[in-house]
Amino acid sequence: PAFRPTRVISLAGPLDMIYAATHGDDRIVTVLGGTPAEVPDRYTSVDPIQNIDPRIPVVAVHGTDDTMVSPENSIRYINAVTQQNGIGS
């Protein structure tokens, strides 16, 4: 990419778009023009959890009562960052 961040702070972001799309988030499906099964390349190219760079520290801030974006998105993403020996909290 032309721009590579040095750190990331996510505020209730849909950090696992496939999880979101397959768990009722129709906004993700609408924006990407289909389900993960219908347009997998689109999800691969923009889904944060599929594009982790373990060299970039990440902080995910997410309210536990969020009804728009499931807090599970942030939990899954930080777990994936940690599994790749990245810095996430």
Image: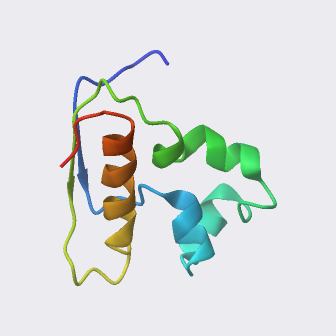
Residue 12's place in the image compared with 66, above or below, is above
Please indicate whether residue 24 sits to the left or right of residue 57 in the image.
Answer: right
Frontmost residue, 35 versus 50: 50
Residue 8's place in the image compared with 29, above or below, is above
Task: Tell me the residue at 61%/60% (across/down).
Answer: 31
Task: Tell me the residue at 35%/29% (across/down).
Answer: 54
Q: Quadrant of residue 86?
A: top left
Q: Quadrant of residue 27?
A: bottom right
Q: What colour scheme governs how the chains and residues are painted in the rendered image of this protein?
A: rainbow
Residue 52's place in the image compared with 77, above or below, is above
Task: Tell me the residue at 18%/49% (across/down).
Answer: 89
For the image shown, how many numbered marks are present on the structure?
Answer: 0
Q: Position of residue 71 (x, y in %)?
A: 31, 72
Q: Position of residue 68 (x, y in %)?
A: 37, 78
Task: Tell me the residue at 46%/45% (across/down).
Answer: 48
Q: Quadrant of residue 26?
A: bottom right
Q: Position of residue 23 (x, y in %)?
A: 56, 78
For this orientation, the residue located farthest to the right is: 38
Frontmost residue, 89 versus 43: 89
Please indicate whether residue 70 sits to the left or right of residue 20 in the image.
Answer: left
Q: Position of residue 81 (x, y in %)?
A: 35, 42
For this orientation, the residue located farthest to the top is: 2
Please indicate whether residue 3 sits to the left or right of residue 21 in the image.
Answer: left
Please indicate whether residue 84 sits to the left or right of residue 44 in the image.
Answer: left
